[in-house]
Amino acid sequence: MSKLTRRTILRAGAGATFLGLAPLTGLMGTAHAAPGTAIRWGVVGTGGIANSMAGMIKLAGNAELAAVSSRRMETARQYAARHNVAATFDSWADMAASDLVDAIYVATPTSVKEEICMDAIGKGKHVLCEKPLASAASARRIIAACRENGLAFMDGTHFVHHPRTLDIKARKLNPWSVASAFQFNLKDRGNIRFNTELEPMGAIGDAGWYNMRAAVEYLPPDVQLAEASAYLRRDRQTGAAIGGSGVLQFSNGATSTWNCGFDSGAVVMDLRITSLEAVIHIDNFLSQNPDGSADFVLSGGGWGPSAKKETLSIPSANPGAALMFEDFGSAIHDASLREQWMRASERTQAWLDAAWASALANEG
């Protein structure tokens, strides 16, 4: 498939006809790689995620990795040499002011994200910012500035761009429960996730963001958060939040239970969506298979012989992270595509804030 062709969802296999749901072959995605001039990206930061996303920008059909900035020019030049980037800066403000980039990818600690985003927006640059934001109020300020200036904004959540997510949402189930877990083992206390000044919410901000986003994506778009109840675990040495659990209750009676943490003996990326019509289970909801496809299990029926279960594999030419940059490029070219991403960011951060506030209150 050409990089610049429209992205479609092609469902593999016979599908969920046993549940009375129509086949989803030929569904269009929320966006596609827009034709025309590639978006020239400037990357702020040279850490692990910035290095990972360099390859994703190059995979995207409408993107070009044009510049990088770091606090130290030496680090910027090392990144540029590693990823074949033409322009280097030791100031993100100078890079945002240059005519070498159209969009800024912010891959910095949470504590400085708003300052960088607002500066870039003021200089007419579109912004894709890594999650989480500092707060719901911060997210609203950044997104309002983008709206006022006719610019695109998106957060750095990958799984929502994969065709698997679009396939599941297109089934229009009516979930009354979204249960998710994202846990892994992080022992390095030198990692910024353990720095309470740079990453105040710790694991709840870093990993719990995905729990919140799963609820945002799979519950009805007009549902409102009614109540959040949460608890956290702290690292005794650093004081960082290294894990959390909780439940969100919504205006339509649905709930979302969630767990996240840096202290798990194994990686867990589990998601279960329960509705009257069917149950969907994904054991790796944040990633995909080596060939780019992603799976989920669709279950229905009753006990014993009446139970039905089918594993579906949704193909994709690119991983979700590369599709994120494609979808962002499409939103730059087509302003009608922007609001869905902005609203999702606002809701995710607001629900995260509510969970964090409850966890802090329950510490006392």
Image: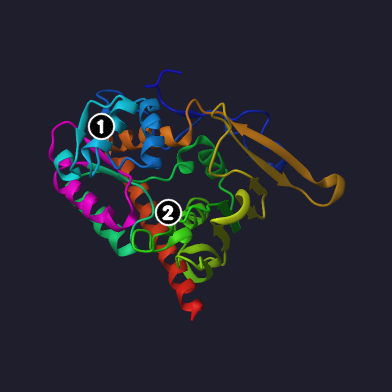
Queried whether the magenta region covers residue 114, the answer comes back as: yes
Under tag 1, what secondary structure?
A: helix
Taking the image as shown, residue 346 lies to the left or right of residue 233, namely left
Q: Nearer the viewer, residue 181 or 277?
A: 181
Q: Which residues are magenta?
A: 96-125
- Residue matched to label 1: 77
Taking the image as shown, residue 117 lies to the left or right of residue 176, namely left
Q: Earlier in the sequence, mark 2 or mark 1?
A: 1
Residue 245 picture location, percent across and down = 56, 65
- Residue matched to label 2: 190
- Considering only vertical position in the picture, is 36 above or below 110? above
**Amino acid type, callout 1:** Arg
The image's mark for residue 340 is none
Residue 348 picture location, percent across and down = 42, 57
Under tag 2, what secondary structure?
A: loop
Q: Nearer the viewer, residue 84 or 150?
A: 84
- Considering only vertical position in the picture, is 118 above or below 32? below
**What residue do we see at 60% from left, 57% from top?**
179
Q: Quadrant of residue 158?
A: top left
**What residue do we see at 45% from left, 55% from top?**
206
Judged from this view, the residue extending furthest toward the top is 2
- Considering only vertical position in the picture, is 311 above or below 250? above
Queried whether the magenta region covers residue 5, the answer comes back as: no
Residue 350 picture location, percent across and down = 39, 63
Q: CA distance from mark 2 to mark 1?
A: 24 Å
**Amino acid type, callout 2:** Gly
